[in-house]
Image (cartoon, rainbow, N blue to C red):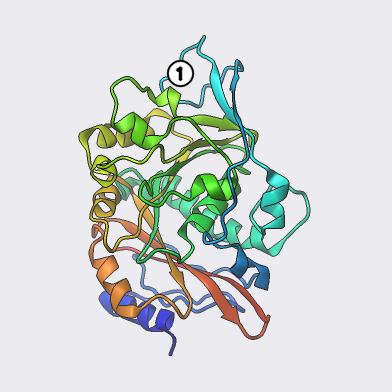
């Protein structure tokens, strides 16, 4: 029995409700769910996914420019204020097996289409009435290097393809920021700059992109109190504004790992959903158990199994399941 199977069996024991069967060719995700919580796994992806995890980072390349185009999707916007713009190299992302705006059908698109659909349904469907800030999604892992940034970026890009939703990707892993390197972008100001200064507005750190419905807040400059800033009153006020200002927006926080960073648990309490990324044959059952014990009980928690090997398909892919108590 693999580490993931043991972990999921343990989660099933924690909540013995009947789980639905999973799709063929998918890693079994035997998690329990309440009546109004759904469960599904994605099919296998190609082997190149494994090489595209968050450990593969590129040097920042994109430049930041002012754009005078009005954009009603940014917080604290002024009708006359210039907007900050980032140009993401979508061709580079596609080559590295990320979701992109390309028209061809690729298995990675289908994987994350299945995952995002559950998150969107929880954020705006019937379950949303039982969750606190259901449109705020924390993406984390038990330890570094398990693929959380890869998952965060792909989720954001996939949700940006929705015609009636917008998405804000926030790099909240202020100790080991990886979103900027993954997207090959560079910014002057970010989250820590806003949280540590009274002279920086939200409009100074929120960047529009060449992906129409995607906005980004980067981690910002290193700060000696970086993790403490995540648990500050100012962060809580910012999260509250994210949750309530725009009803069609999903906010994805690429957060620090759960083990070793106490502030991640505080951030989890501000969100309605969490996605915990596991790496097949790497994530340890005892560490996963400890990490899950740190999450609020009322949080809807999903799992993405990264680099799951399917012998039938001879490739890597993602399993996905949901449970909540």
Q: Where is residue 136 in the image (x, y as percent from the top left)?
A: 39, 44
Residue 1 in which image quadrant: bottom left
Residue that carries the numbered disc 1 in the rendered image:
77
- In the rendered image, which quarter is residue 247 located in? top left
**Left of 139 or right of it: where is 93?**
right
The residue lying at 43 percent from left, 70 percent from top is: 278
Which residue is at 35% across, 66% downward? 142
Q: Is residue 137 left or right of residue 292?
A: right
Q: Can residue 119 be seen in this view?
A: yes
Residue 178, image x, y percentages: 48, 50
- Whether residue 15 is visible, yes or no, is no
134 or 261: nearer the viewer: 261
Q: Residue at 48%, 30% (x, y): give it.
A: 188
Where does the C terminus fall, quadrant-wise?
A: bottom left
From this viewpoint, which residue is outermost toward the right?
104
Work out whether 19 lies above or below 273.
below
As drawn, the residue found furthest toward the bottom would be: 1
């Amino acid at each position: 029995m693999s580490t993931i199977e043991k972990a999921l069996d343990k989660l099933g024991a924690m909540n013995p409700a009947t789980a639905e069967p999973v799709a063929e060719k998918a890693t079994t995700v035997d998690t329990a769910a309440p009546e109004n919580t759904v469960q599904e796994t994605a099919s296998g992806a190609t082997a190149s996914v494994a090489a595209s995890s968050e450990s593969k980072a590129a040097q920042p390349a994109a430049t930041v420019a002012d754009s005078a185009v009005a954009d009603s999707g940014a917080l604290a916007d002024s009708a006359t204020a210039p907007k900050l713009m980032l140009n993401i190299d979508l061709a580079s992302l596609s080559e590295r097996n990320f979701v992109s705006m390309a028209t061809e059908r690729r298995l990675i698109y289908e994987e994350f289409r299945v995952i995002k659909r559950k998150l969107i349904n929880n954020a705006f469907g019937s379950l949303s009435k039982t969750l606190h800030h259901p449109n705020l999604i924390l993406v984390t892992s038990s330890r570094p290097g398990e693929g959380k940034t890869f998952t965060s970026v792909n989720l954001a890009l996939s949700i940006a393809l929705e015609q009636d939703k917008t998405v804000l990707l926030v790099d909240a892993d202020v100790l080991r920021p990886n979103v900027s390197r993954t997207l090959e972008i560079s910014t002057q100001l970010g989250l820590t700059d806003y949280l540590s200064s009274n002279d920086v507005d939200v409009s100074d750190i929120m960047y529009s992109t060449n992906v129409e419905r995607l906005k980004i807040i980067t981690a910002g400059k290193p700060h000696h109190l970086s993790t403490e800033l995540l648990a500050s009153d100012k962060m809580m006020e910012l999260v509250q504004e994210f949750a309530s200002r725009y009803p069609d927006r999903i906010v994805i926080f690429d957060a620090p790992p759960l083990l070793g960073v106490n502030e991640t648990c505080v951030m989890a309490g501000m969100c309605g959903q969490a996605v915990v990324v596991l790496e097949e044959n790497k994530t340890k059952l005892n560490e996963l158990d400890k990490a899950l014990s740190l999450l609020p009980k009322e949080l809807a928690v999903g799992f993405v199994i990264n680099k799951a090997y399917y012998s039938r398909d001879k490739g890597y892919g993602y399993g996905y399941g949901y449970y909540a108590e």
